[in-house]
Amino acid sequence: MVEISQTASAIDERHTARPNQQPRKPRRGVVVRVERRWPRPVILGCQFGILAGILLWWESGARAGWIDPFFWSQPSAIWSAGVTFVTRWSALYDTWFTVSSTLIGFVVGTAGGAAIGLSFWWSRNIAEIFEPYVIVFNAVPKLAFAPLIILIFGIGIASKIALSIALTMVIAILAAYSGVKAVDEDLVRMMYALGGRKYQIFFKAVVPSVLPWVVSSMRINIGLALAGTIVGEFVSSKYGLGKLIMYAGSTYDMSLIWVGIIVLSTVAVLMYGAVSRLERVLLRGVHASTG
Amino acid sequence: MPSSGALTLSSMTHVFGAGPEAVTAVVDISIDVPGGQFASIIGRSGCGKTTLFNIVAGLLTPSRGRVLLDGEDITGRAGFVAYMLQKDLLLPWRTIIENVVLGLELSGVSKRTSWPKALPLLQRYGLGGFENSFPSALSGGMRQRAALLRTLLCERDVILLDEPFGALDAQTRISMQEWLLGLWKDFGRTVVLVTHDVDEAIFMSDRVYVLSPRPGRLKSVIEVDLPRPRSRSIMTSGKFSQLKERCMQLLFEDDPAPPTLN
């Protein structure tokens, strides 16, 4: 105690508080268990096994009568409905209609939203003026506008694209705006001091730093663009997978509904995969960590 | 020695805010750095170092006082003084060479002119072989070297450094200080270093400006008449210790005396 008071004058000895000096309980420690990893084929086998089990249980249930095939259909019926669907000439066109509307809505919505979000960097005042509109537009259930949008844009592809844009744009705006707000102020100031003009700083520093934010919104947006298109097709359409599902539902063709859902899911997975790949390509330039 | 690059701060005062909540950051600071000199500003936290830095960099217009560069009034205008912070602020998506030529690129110099200019400098100043690496592949010291070269390459007469080596470990810092002295000799620019490290200030500078805190006032100017070129061995010399002693005394003399105990 005496030594402490001599060396550290910042300690006020008039106070009697001291660290707890009582003997502690003995420590017991924890054994960290690491799960042993199974070989890849075993994992794959289990995954296929589960799928096969579900299908088998469904089919046998429908045949034995404890699943009502009128409502639930059954794998064998879905398979034959699928074959009929694929051999009919409109199958490809319906799929293409939905995919193209989704992709156009996705690209226009994401790019347009990113451009609007990025433009908020130019003026804090403008950004502040528009912020409540963006927040409200984000909160509004845009799908509720579907009947209105169909009336304005017609029952063709334009209305489906419009719905997809409505859903995706606000997400991209918010993502880009968050990115803009996260741009390092010190970096911007330093670039001014190095003699940069505002447009140079925008293209050389702001756009590349915001890119990862926009890219991260793309995975959400590809799903939303598909949802917008499908809802548009549900409300009123001549073509598309959504229209197919709606038609099948109104004629109690449960197998065809399942076919529509399966094709739609396949398309969704493929587009998600493509976007993930695009994401990697775009981020390669930004997060370049390997020389 | 180039005669250009003389930096003068005349009776600089800055107050943040207004009314009863106004905070006075710096009061009546006058500093005169001749062209080509190395000057340091030291002070404890709250002495307005950063405010002073921002004023000289032209990022902040002072309440009163002027910044003169070779007699020309540059108060409140950025782009005359290049600076560097503790953060290297390298763009992660650009290679080292692309980062280093950024200043030239922003002033409209083409790649064809800037790269041949920058590449030999990267070789000379210890970044050879890293020109095509990305900043994330480099150590903190290397990144600061790149940041400093970027600052020096943009052809300003005055270079302002704010704790440039503050985030580095003690050994790396010393080698970076020697490296910076070499660069300073080669480039012949006026350098103003803002730091809290007394050793660093004395080791590098011709003159050390000591500030007192709350509000920041110029307390004293110490002329460092150690011979140049300096190597790190000078840091253990008697002359160095005397200067350090004086700096420490100036920095800590306002502290309340330690309570007497028995």
Image (cartoon, grey):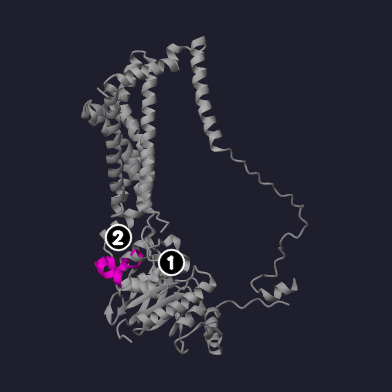
Amino acid of disc 2: Ile
Question: Picture quarter containing residue A275?
Answer: top left
Q: Looking at the picture, how far across and down is residue B49, in whole percent? A: 43, 73
- Which disc number belongs to residue A201? 2
Q: Is residue A172 above or below residue A164?
A: below
Horizontal side of A94 relative to B15 (left or right) equals: left
The tag on residue B143 is: 1
Mark 2 element type? helix
Pinpoint the chain carrying mark 1. B
Tell me the amino acid under the disc marked 1.
Arg
Give the residue displayed 34% in from the left and 48% down from the top.
Answer: A176
Q: Quadrant of residue B19?
A: bottom left
**Left or right side of B72 for A65:** right
Same subunit: marks 1 and 2? no
Residue B20 image offset from top left, x and y in percent: 42, 65
Is disc 1 surrounded by few (<14), some (14 to 19) or many (20+) residues within 10 Å? many
The quadrant the N terminus of chain B occupies is: bottom left
User: Residue B114 in magenta?
Assistant: yes
Query: Closest to the observer: A170 or B76?
Result: A170
Q: Which residues are magenta?
A: B98-116
